[in-house]
Amino acid sequence: MKGVRSIVFGCLLATTGAIWAATLDPATQTAFVNKLTAPPVIDARGGGHFVIPIISYSANLGVKSPTLGSPMSTPMYCYDGVFPGPTILAKKGVQATFEFPNMLVDGNNNPIPHMFGVDRTLHWANPLNQPNTTGGYTGPIPTTVHLHGGKLSPESDGHPDSWYTPNYAITGGEFASPIYVYPNNQQAATLFYHDHSLGMTRLNVYAGMAGFYLIQDSTSEKLIMNGSLPGPDFDLPLHIQDREFNDDGTLQWPSTGVNPNPTWNPQFFGRFMLVNGKVWPYHKVQPRTYRVRLLNACDSRFLNLKFSNNMSFTLIASDQGFLPAPKTVNSVLLAPGERAEVLVDFAKLKSGAVTLTNDAKAPYPNGTSPNAAVEGRIMRFQLAREEDLPKDTFIPGKFEGIPRQTLSTTLPVRKIVLGQKTDVFGRAEHFLGTATAGYLRWQDPVTELPQLNSTEIWEIYNNSNIGHPIHLHLVAFQLLSRQTYTATVYNSTGIMTNVVLTGTPSSSGPTETGWKDTIYAPPRQVTRIIAKYDILGNYVFHCHMLSHEDHDMMRPFTVVP
Ligand code: C2O
Ligand code: CU
Ligand code: CU
């Protein structure tokens, strides 16, 4: 990352050749002057069919020209032409179907090339079947949509090889149908949908392809009715992402390389923090309790969120829904892909404002601390004057939580390993694999084949020096424990033997007592999860640092009869 920030290969004007633009200095921007906005809502709670095209669009992210001070626009690729994509509301048990036509075409209906440098040396979608060599890609952009946390059939899951180009002209091997069927047979939760194209996810999500998907059920409705949860007027979903910009307001994605060029990089950390598509926004709040839904949609950056006045708040839900019990905390750690729901009582603000901050090191947990005056701040909440506000009718009840279900199994555990090597170009590359087979690539044969309706424990051994958020498609899982260990790990292969557990198994963190779909696997620890595999077919599990996922830190798993 270092050294590529000052000059970047811009592919934005790819039709007219490369441009060189300087990096936008965060110091040229004033924080907390952009009003927080909410994405438009698509209400699918009554079922139906919805068409959400993927469009090339110029967004106003609240970034100002460093010389003129005027607003700049930022070309993006977004769902329905908004960033973040529309917030989809769904209801448990009510099926809805979706189409996400890829409209990344020019005025003559010809596919446009990607705005960022596409590294063709990765194992990637490769629509034109070109050799995997250096040199950028200017062909049509592949897209596929994954509902993160959704319990879906394989055909609707947005498998990395289910990509399609504009007009469905070229499709990947797992493409089944343009129609995505979302049965919504799962409890109330804060999910999100985002692109999942093989070896392109980091680029497509960075370009704007992500949005909220909120499922409600009779429990969540009852909690609102009885005053345990604030209603829709005080339900605040916050989509948090980091970005870098060029001086002209275009998004900057570092991809300048020597061999290959453009190149993939092991990670990305932007200094501009965006919430719901605005840089360092502010939001006026009433002196009352809000339900705040937090999503870490960054590529590689972990977020440890707290308020500048250190006020406490109450955790009520994680990835897959409500926790067994509410928990009062002063901070919440979210790895990329994780969500949390919290109750924040802004009546605690005696006056003025409070800033939502992040102090998670990058990479997590042993990297560099964020600059508190730049990427260490996220947004500001300002107390509004009562007379400017709608009447508050909230009568606080007590949020009780949903009891934790007990899962158990007698099946042997699976030992998954994570580790780091360098790839053929000398770049640090992270892998998934198994203790007995060592590091495996995406295209290696499937090693994880759970039987339909079986419950399995997976042990994730992290032999690398950084933390990785591991996400499994299909299942909601529970964290059992984490523990330190020693082992013999063969560096060249990743094969791991002589595992000796050392520390005491640690219990779950405050966000980890409920159902999860993405879990932080700390370095040099084993993270144990348990889940039931209850739909047949091909799914994937991967690191949710998108840059890792795009370069082989992803593996298939297949649920078999
Ligand atoms: Cu949110 Cu497979 O990803
Ligand atoms: Cu997912
Ligand atoms: Cu990773």
Image (spheres, rainbow, N blue to C red):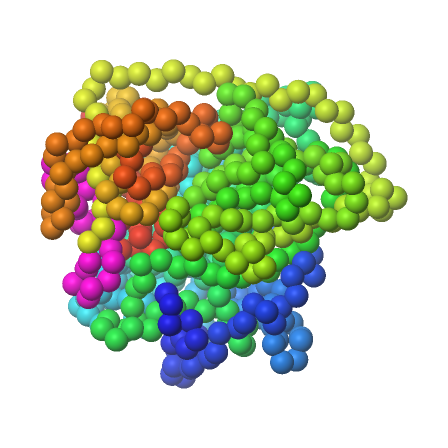
Q: Is residue 197 left or right of residue 415?
A: right
The residue lying at 42 percent from left, 41 percent from top is 148
Q: Is residue 106 left or right of residue 81?
A: left
Asked if residue 194 is positioned above or below residue 346 in the image, the reply reads below
**x, y (%) of residue 107?**
48, 74
Q: Is residue 244 among what the camera can see?
A: yes
Placement of the N terminus among the 4 image quadrants: bottom left
Residue 443 colored magenta?
yes
**x, y (%) of residue 417?**
22, 39
Q: Residue furthest right?
A: 387
- Looking at the rendered structure, the number of numbered marks drawn on it comes to 0
Q: Is residue 450 left or right of residue 148?
A: left
Q: Is residue 446 among what the camera can see?
A: no
Q: Residue furthest bottom?
A: 16
The residue lying at 27 percent from left, 25 percent from top is 457
Asked if residue 277 is positioned above or below residue 259 in the image, the reply reads above
**x, y (%) of residue 528?**
30, 28
Q: Quadrant of residue 44?
A: top right
The residue lying at 20 percent from left, 19 percent from top is 411
Asked if residue 453 is positioned above or below residue 497 in the image, the reply reads above
Q: Nearer the viewer, residue 372 or 52?
A: 372
The residue lying at 25 percent from left, 28 percent from top is 502
Placement of the C terminus among the 4 image quadrants: top left
Q: Nearer the viewer, residue 185 or 260?
A: 260
Magenta segment, which residues?
422-445
Residue 253 colored magenta?
no
**x, y (%) of residue 515?**
43, 27
Q: Nearer the viewer, residue 374 or 239?
A: 374
Q: Quadrant of residue 435?
A: top left
